[in-house]
Image (tube, helix red, strand yellow):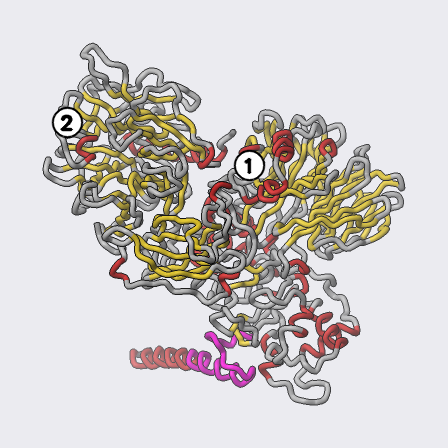
Amino acid sequence: MNLRALIYGLGGVGLAILLGWLGHHFGSTTHIRRKIGQEPLAKASCFQCHFVSTKRLPWARPRPHHDSPAGLALSPDGKRIYVALDDRDEVAEADVASLKVLRRARVAGGPFGLALNPEGSSLFVACKNGDRLAVLETAGLTETGSLGVGLGPASVAFCRTAKGDRLVVANSISDDLSILSVSPLAELTRPAAGREPFAVTAMPDGSRVFVANRLVGLETLRTGPAAEITVVDPGTTRVVRRDTLDSAHLSEGASVVPARSWVLVPLVKVRNQVPITQVANGWVMSSGLAVTDLKSGEVIQMPLDEANDYFSDPSAVAVDPGARRAFVASGGSDVVSVVDLERLAKWLGRASVAEKQEAIYDLALSSEYVIGRIPTKRNPRQVVVSGDGSKIFVAERLEDTVLVADARTLQPLGRIVLGDGGQSDPIRRGERVFTSSAYTFQHQFSCRSCHPDGHVDGLSYDFDGDGIGDNLLDNRSLQGVAGTEPFKWNGKNPTLEIQCGPRFARVLMRTEPFPAAQLKDLTTFIQSLPPPRIARHAGDKLTQSEERGRAIFFATKTPDGKEIPLARRCVTCHPPPLYTVKLPFNVGTKGPFDSSAAFDAPHLLGIADSAPYLHDGRAQTLEELWTIYNTNDMHGVSSYMNKIQLNDLIDYLKTL
Amino acid sequence: MIGWRQGRRLICETAVAGTVGMLTGAFGLPAHGTEPALVLTQTPRMAAVAPSKNPLDSRYPPGSRLVLAKPPFAAAHTRILSEGLTAAASPVVSYDGRMVVFAGKAGPDRDWQIYESTLDSGRPRALTSVPGGAMQPALLPHGSLVFAAPADAASRVPQLYVQGQGGKSRQLTFAPTGAADPSMLLDGRILFVSGRPSETRGVGAGTALYTVNNDGTEVMAFACQHDPPAFLWSPKQLNDGRVAFLVSADGNHAAPTTADCVRMARPFVSRSPLLPEAPVHIRSVRPSGESNLLVCAEVPPAADGQGAWACFRVVRTARSLGSPLFVDPGWNTIEAVEAVSSSPPLGRISTMEPAKRTGQILCLDVNDTTFRKEDRPAAKATRVRLTAAAPAGGLRVLGEVDVQADGSFMAEVPADVPLGFEALDQQGKIVRRELPTLWVRSGENRSCVGCHAAHNRAPHNHRPLAVRAPLPRLCSPPENALAGKAP
C-alpha cells in the first residue's frame, strides 16, 4: 500500500466518522423533534429509543450471592441460633457455645424473618422474595410446610392465643398482614397494614401483636407524614388500633417490654418539609426510639443521637428478659446503642407532657438513658437477646457474621462466621458504601436512609439548590435506574457518578465526595438493583382490564377517532422496554417555585410501588396524576377518559 | 460510656502510626517502644518579661522556642525546631506526623508569623507574611492552614483566615468580638474562641466556644455561651469525646488558669473541671494516645523559690497531675503535643457561591424561645428588624421583615457582615434582641430554629410559610462589608 492510498483511506474513515457523528447528533435531534412533536430539551441520540434492551443492563446479569444474615431466632434453651440467609436461600443453625455453624437448610424464596414456637420445635420463615411462609422442623432442619402469603413477607411472629396458635406475617410490598393458623397452616385473614409493614412483635400472652411499618402513609403526606404502628388481636385476627409516629418512618424493628407495658420501635425522625439549608443539628433527620405506653396509649419519641454525633438507620431493637436494657442496632453507624430502660422510665416519669412531646428534638437528651455504644462490623440489622439476658447476638449483614457480645459488660465475646464478607465483589463493596453513614457530616445518614433497599422513602425534600424553598423534589427510586440516564429530576446529571459524586456531597453529605474507588463501587451496586417488584409474576397474562389499559397506553387516537398529538401520547415519553425516553419534557407540572418547566421522564418499571408521583411528589396516587394534575392534557391526553378507562390505564401501569 | 468512635479512630491511628513510625524512624524520631516524641514550647525560666502591647510577646517572651523531646525525655536530649527565631509557640503536628507548624517571630521587632519545620531537620520556613502578624495555627485535612490574625491585638480584633497551598489567605470569620484559637474538630468544623456580645442576657464580657465550617459558613455556638463570664482559650477536642479548654478570670494569661471540659454529646450541659485537683496554673492540654492527656502546668516551687512549668501525661480518669513526664531545669515547658500521625478530620465541599454578594437567612419560628422560660415575652413578635455591625462601630439597620403566621421569616442579606436581630411586637417595641454575632457567606443559605431557641435542638417538621412568601431583600451596598480583605 502506498502512502497516498493510506492517507486517502484514513481520510475517508475520518470523514465517515465525522458524517456519522453529525448525522447522529443532528439527525437524531431532528428525528426526535419530528417523532415526539417537542424540541428535545437535552442532548439526544439514537439510543434514547433504539437499541435499548433490559437484557444487557447490569441488574439483569447474574451476580454473586453472599451469606448475609437477616433474621435471627434463638432456641428456647439458648443453645442454638437460627440465621436467615436470604441471599443464599438458606437457613443456618449455629451452636452458641462454639460459635460454629452446625448445618444449613435450603429454603427457597429469600428467607428473611424468623420465629420459633415456644417449644423450639418449629421454625417459621418469612420468605421475602418468594411471597410464602415456610415451616421447618428444627430437629432435622427440614421444610415441612409452606403457605403463600402477601407480597414481600419480611417478618413473622408466633402467638399462642386462646383460640389457638397464630402467626402474623408482615407483607412489606402488598402493605398487609397475613394472619395464619398454625395447625392447620392456613391464612385466616389478610388485613391492611400501614405502608411497608416490616417488623412484628407479639405480647407473650398472645393478646396483641404490634407491627412497625416502614414508610409513612400516603394519606398523611399533606397533613404531616406519619408512619403507622398497627396493633392486631391475633385471636380475633382483627386490627384493633393504628398508632401513628408523627414525622417518623423507616422503622424496621419492634420489641414488646411486658414488664413495663411498653412497645419499643426504632425510627428515623425525618424533617423533609424543612428546607435543607444544613444538616447540622439533625436538620434533615435524626434517630429515635418510639415508646408506646400500653396503659396510657401515649407514643413518645425519644432521641438516640448525640448533639454532635448521630447513629443512623436504627434497624432493630431487642430487650433483655429483665426489661433492664434495650439494644438498638444502627445499621448505618455500625453500632448497637444500649438504652437503660430504668433511666428511661425515670425520665418519662418526671417529664411533663410538653417535655415528652419535645423530647425527640433535644439532641443532648440521650445521655440521660443511653449508657453505651457497642461497636460492630458492617451493617448491624438484627439483634436478639439470650433468654437469660447474658448475651446479645447481632446480625452484621454486610460482613456475613453474627456478633456475640456480653449484654452486661457490652464487650464482644466472638463471632459466628457465615461467609467471607464478599469484599472481592464490587456490588457488595458498593452496598457497604451505600449503607454507611461514615461519609456524611457527623454520620447523620447513609444513602439507605432515604433509599431503603435502594427504593423510595415516599417523601419529597426541599433542596436549597438556588436559594431557600424553591426546590421541592420527590425522592426517586434507585431500583432499576441502570440505563435510564440522565438522572436528577431536571435531567442534568448524565451519569450516576456525577449524581452521587460532588453534587451529593455538597447538597447532602456536607463533607467531601466519596473517594473514587468507593464511588465506583457505589454506582456498581446501584446499577445492580433490579426494578421494584410488582404483584404479578413473569409470564402472567394481562387481565382484561390490563389489556384495555395497555391499549390506552399505546393509543394514537382517542376512542372517538381523534388523533392524539405525538407529544401527548404515553408511549412517546415512556417507550418500552424501560418506559422512558430518557429526556426531560414539559408536561405542564411546573410549580410556582420551579425554575424550569422541563422534567426528566422517569422510567415506569415498578411504578405502582413508587408513590408519590411527579417531580415534587404532589400526586399521592397514580389516579391523581390525571384526575387532579393533568387538567391541560399536557401529561398525556386523558380528558376523554371515563372512570373505567382511567382504572384500566392504571391497572396496566401496575403491571410494568 | 464507651467512646466507640474514638476507640476506632485510635485503632486506625495506631495502625497509621505504626507505619509512619517506621518512616519517622528515618527522620530521627524515637524508636523507644511505642511512646511518641513530644514537641514542646519552652520559655526561658529566668527571662524578665518586658511590657508589650502584644499579648503574644508576654505569653511567649523572647527566647521562647520549640524543641523535640524523645523518650526517655531527658532535658539534655532535646533538639530545637525553631532554630533562628526569636520566639516560637503554638505547635501543631501535621496529620502525617512529619511536620510541625507553629507561630514564630524572626526578630524582636518583627511580627509573629506562621512557620513550619520538618521534625527531622528543624529548619523553620515561613508560611505567612501577614501585616500585623499571624498566630495560633491549625491544619485543615488537606494541609491548608488556618490561623488567627492579626497577632497584634491592639490594631483590631483578630479573625480566622485560611491559606491554601498557593499562599493566598481568605477570611473565614467576621465576628465583631473577634475570633481566635482555632482547632479542628474531627467532624471537620473549626472550633474557635470568640467574645460574647456584651448584651447577651446581661452576662457581660467573656469568651465562649463557637464552630464554623472550613469556608466560614454555618457559624454556630458550641458551648459556654451562657456560663458565668470568664476567658476561655486554647480549646482542643480530646480522643475520648470531650473538648478541653483553659479558663482564666480575665484576659491575662499570666493569671491563674484552670482547665475545664465539655462533652461533645451535650456541650451546653456538661461543663466540668478537667482535673479537679490539679493546680490552678495550667497552660496547655492536648490529647495523648488512646484517652490520656498531655498537660503543661506549674509544679511546686523548687529550691530557687521559682515555680517551674513541666509536662505531665495524665490518664483520663485522673483528678490530679501526678509526676511530671518532662521537666527542664533551664526552661519552662508550657505547651506539649505528641509528634505522631493522626487521622485527619472530615473534609467538606464548600456551599458558597463566590460570585454572589448575598446570602439568605430563614428562621423557622421567631417566637420559639424555648431556651429559658424567663426569656419568653408576653407579646409575640410580628416583625423582625435586621441590623448589621458598622465598621466604625455601632449598628446600622438593614431593614425590617414581616413575621409569618407560623413565626417564620426569611430575608436576603449582605454576605460577610455581622448580623443582628431585633424582634418587634405589633407596637414596634423590641421584645428580644441579638446583637450582631453571626454572618452568612456568599450564596450561603442559613437557618435557625428560633430566636433564643434551646441549643442542640432539631427543628419540627413543617414547611415554613416564609418560603412561600416573596423574599425581602435587605442588601445594602457592599462598602460597609467587612469581607474580602486580606489580613
The Cα–Cα distance between marks 1 and 2, rounded to whole angstroms, is: 49 Å
A563 horizontally vs B282: left or right: right
Q: Amino acid at mark 1?
A: Ser
Snapshot quadrant of residue A606: bottom right
In the image, farthest residue toward the top: B303
A129 horizontally vs A146: left or right: left
Return the x and y of residue B271 as percentages of the image width and height: 43, 31
For label 2, the crowd category at 10 Å Cα-Cα, with few meaning under 14, some 14 to 19 and many 20 or more, is: few
Return the x and y of residue A326 as percentages of the image width and height: 64, 34
A248 inside magenta stretch: no
Name the residue beneath numbered marker 2: B49
- Does any portion of residue A451 appear in the rendered image? yes
Q: Main secondary structure of the magenta part?
A: helix
The residue located at (33%, 31%) in the rendering is B21
Return the x and y of residue A525 as percentages of the image width and height: 55, 54
Q: Nearer the viewer, residue B81 or B247?
A: B247
Q: Nearer the viewer, residue A289 or A104?
A: A289
Chain holding disc 1: A
Chain holding disc 2: B
- Secondary structure beneath disc 1? helix
Return the x and y of residue B130 as percentages of the image width and height: 18, 46
Q: Amino acid at mark 2?
A: Val
The residue located at (37%, 81%) in the rendering is A15
> Which portion, as a residue range, is magenta?
A21-50
Q: Nearer the viewer, residue A166 or B119?
A: A166
The image shows residue B332, relative to residue B18, as above or below, that is: above
Query: Which numbered circle lies on residue A366?
Result: 1
A28 inside magenta stretch: yes
- Does any portion of residue A439 appear in the rendered image? no
